[in-house]
Amino acid sequence: MRGFGHIGVIQALEEHGYRPEAIAGCSAGAIVGALYASGYTPQAILEIADKSNLFPATAFRFRRTGFLDTGFLSDIFRKYIPDNSFEALKIPLHVATTNLATGQVAYVNQGPLDTALLASCSIPLVFSPIQRDDGVYYDGGILDNLPIAPLHPRCNMLIGVNVNGLDTVDPEKMTPARTMDRIIHLAINRSVRENAKRCDLYIEPPGMLKFGMFDKKKHHEIYQYAYEYASAYLAKR
């Protein structure tokens, strides 16, 4: 759900005259990137969330490889991006995924869009992995949670956005879900720190981990929080 912070940052960037010529993302960032690359405005993406049943009760199915079924995401992709191909997008998009067999990051920028998006957001133990023609894939954030590689050599200006910045927590107040959430992001934080150094502009709203991974009633609050931070940050530049 913290991925809604990307929408707020995009809104702030637009208001300050920044519009991307290419996008790269992983996990929720890949989903937001795909909708934006399809031509939806930040406000329209929020409206899609309002109309969609995010994390419905029927999606919680305890399986060996994950406890959430991705069917609800597939429904959203089919409804709002019916062309279902990278080639049909209005802005070039690169989606980061992790190949479980090879242990390497794979950037996808052509072919069917839905399977690439599902693979990119398949958080281990939360979602089941996605089988594609050449292997089994998980969340791209495992190896590259700020995927600048497809864009870095070609950009005049590279803007990085991270909505999972680490902060200090009180262990006594950690629930099992929040503990799992934090462990995941501790593991992936190194790639973010290294890639952030290569960005010309880097936006990381602080304190985002106060919003839980499944706080689906707070998507407008998450959007607003990230929007206000990014707006204030950009106004100082």
Image: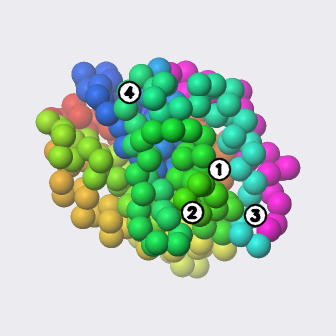
Where does the image place residue 128, in percent across and percent down from the top left? 68, 62
Q: Provide the residue designation for mark 3.
A: 67
Q: How is the image coloured?
A: rainbow
Question: For mark 1, does the 10 Å Cα neighbourhood hold few (<14), some (14 to 19), or many (20 or more) residues?
Answer: some
* Image: magenta residue range: 40-63
Judged from the image, the secondary structure of the residue bearing numbered disc 2 is: strand
Q: Earlier in the sequence, mark 2 or mark 4?
A: 4
Where does the image place residue 175, in percent across and percent down from the top left? 65, 71
Where does the image place residue 80, in percent across and percent down from the top left? 63, 25
Instruction: Identify the residue shown where x is 40% and y is 52%.
Output: 107
Q: Are circles 1 and 2 on residues that touch, CB within 8 Å?
A: no
Q: Nearer the viewer, residue 42 or 127?
A: 127
The image's mark for residue 91 is 4
Q: Provide the residue designation for mark 2.
A: 135
Judged from the image, the secondary structure of the residue bearing numbered disc 1 is: loop
Cα separation, mark 3 vs mark 4, equals: 33 Å
In this rendering, the label closer to the viewer, 1 or 2: 2
Q: Are circles 3 and 4 on residues that touch, CB within 8 Å?
A: no
Q: Earlier in the sequence, mark 1 or mark 4?
A: 4
Residue sitting at the far right? 58
- Quarter of the image for residue 103 reads bottom left
Instruction: Identify the residue shown where x is 75% and y is 45%.
Output: 71
Cα separation, mark 2 vs mark 4, equals: 27 Å
Judged from the image, the secondary structure of the residue bearing numbered disc 4 is: loop
Residue sitting at the far bottom? 172
Q: Earlier in the sequence, mark 2 or mark 3?
A: 3
Q: Say which amino acid is labelled 3.
A: Phe
The image's mark for residue 215 is 1
Residue 1 seen in the figure: no
Q: Say which amino acid is labelled 1.
A: Asp
Residue 33 seen in the figure: yes
- Quarter of the image for residue 77 reads top right
